[in-house]
Image (spheres, rainbow, N blue to C red):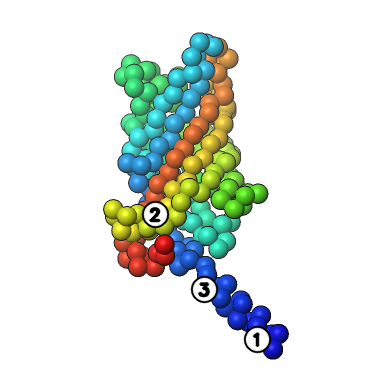
Amino acid sequence: MRSTVLMLAASLGLLAVPAFAAPMTYTLDPGHTQVRFCWNHFGFSNPCANMNTIQGTLVYDARDPPRSSVQVTMPLSGLDTHVPALDTRLKEADFFDAAKYPDITFKSTRVIPGAKPDDLTVEGELTAHGVTMPVTLHARLNKIGEQPLLQRPAIGFNATAEIRRSAFGVGAYVPMVSDAVHISITVEADGPKSAAATVKH
């Protein structure tokens, strides 16, 4: 009798897992995804820049988060400081050298569940200015479910990281202009329309 009860409980537990908990591949929505990086300028201010036209895919496995992954490309053509002259300056040879290295990319290598259910540590490789270095993102799952306007699965995360720009060969004016660059990320990504019927509210 006890074994029957345990089997029934296990079955109910499996049924309780949302249908969208299976691994799913999402495409980043560039209109609702933002990568922002900020630095200190001679101690006077902390300007920031956005990376627009972000492209990428995100695989999320709610049952087994370590099987999740993310891959992102950020064209430097989309770099936006809201100051056109600064946009041009940052793309020059002694900074990002966008003519030679037109993209910044990130590819995860490991996803580690955090102490809280929605927290994740995402380890990966960031490539900028032709240099690839390990970077760790501290991420939090915002929501997973159906996007009501598109009527398809969607997922959203926030994440933060800090890098040393000199490690990527972008060391102009260090230390007067800070070597440390603080990165904040918000991501929204959409799943395939064909999977909409599997999403549970």
Q: Residues within 10 Å of mark 2 (few under 14, many from 20)?
A: many
Using the rendered view, name the quadrant where residue 54 is placed: top left
Mark before the other along the chain sequence, 3 or 1: 1
Q: Amino acid at mark 3?
A: Leu
Q: CA distance from mark 2 to mark 1?
A: 37 Å
Identify which residue, 4 or 150, lies in the foreground.
4
Q: Residue at x 46, y 37 (%)?
A: 185
Q: Nearer the viewer, residue 65 or 115?
A: 115
Of label 2 and label 1, which has the lower sequence position?
1
Q: Is residue 17 above or below residue 39?
A: below
Residue at 35% across, 46% down: 29
Q: Residue furthest right?
A: 2
Q: How many C-alpha atoms fall within 10 Å of the one at disc 3: few (<14), some, or many (≥20)?
A: few
- Side of 2 relative to 14 (left or right): right
Quadrant of the rendered structure where residue 92 is? top left
Rendering coords of residue 89 (x, y %): 38, 18
Marks 2, 1: nearer the viewer: 1
Q: Position of residue 171 (x, y in %)?
A: 53, 20
Label 2 sits on residue: 154
Q: Is residue 198 above or below residue 7?
A: above
Front tag of 2 and 3: 3
In the picture of the structure, the residue carrying the numbered disc 1 is: 4
Q: Secondary structure at mark 1?
A: helix
Labels 2 and 3: the sequence-earlier one: 3
Q: Residue 133 or 93: which is nearer the viewer?
A: 133
Question: Does the rendering let one see residue 130?
Answer: no
Residue type pointed to by label 2: Ala
Mark 1 crowdedness (10 Å alpha carbons): few <14, some 14-19, many ≥20: few
- Dot 3 corresponds to which residue? 15
Q: Secondary structure at mark 3?
A: helix
Task: Please state if 153 lies on the left or on the right of 63 as rendered.
Answer: left
Task: Give the x, y percent position of residue 63.
Answer: 55, 63
